[in-house]
Amino acid sequence: MAASYTTGGRQPDGTVRLDVEGDLDLTTRSTLVGHVDRLLEDAAVTGIVIDVSAVEFIDSSCIGALIGCKLNAGKAGRTLRVQGARGQVDEVFEMTGVTAILTAPPSA
């Protein structure tokens, strides 16, 4: 199933949620990165939370994309974290050792 993306409204602290549904793989990688890049272009956005609770499959290309997005957010002085990993997505996060990197809440 192709991925779909829904951007939630900006919270008072400037955080925006990006809800993702479907499969994250090589064919959807550039779209995922594009959504995050567009959010980072908005100076009022201080952080991004990517909710993957409706994602059923993720491959290594999108793991790499999420890490790249987190690095880009950090370079821009913003935060990015992933929440809601379950099933295969959670298993892949654990197997690849990225759970703590991608799901850590922003430092206070």
Image (tube, rainbow, N blue to C red):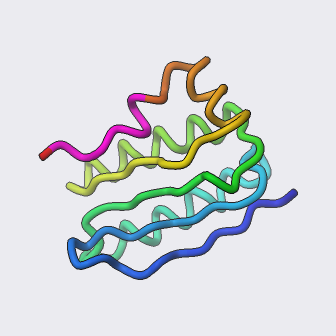
The residue that appears at 47% across and 47% down in the rendered structure is: 82
Whole-percent x, y for residue 27 in the image: 79, 51
Residue nearest the observer in this picture, 95 or 61 = 95
Whole-percent x, y for residue 70 in the image: 39, 45
Question: In the orientation shown, which residue stands out farthest toward the left?
Answer: 108
Magenta residues span 100-107
In this rendering, position of residue 11 left or right of residue 77? right
The residue that appears at 76% across and 42% down in the rendered structure is: 57
Task: Name the quarter where the N terminus is drawn.
Answer: bottom right
Whole-percent x, y for residue 51 in the image: 54, 57
Q: On screen, 29 above or below 61?
A: below
Residue nearest the observer in this picture, 78 or 107 = 107
Is residue 85 part of the magenta span, yes or no? no
The residue that appears at 52% across and 75% down in the rendered structure is: 7
In this rendering, position of residue 45 left or right of residue 94? left
Count of labels in the image: 0
In this rendering, position of residue 2 left or right of residue 74? right
**In which image quadrant can residue 28 be found?**
bottom right
Whole-percent x, y for residue 69 in the image: 45, 48
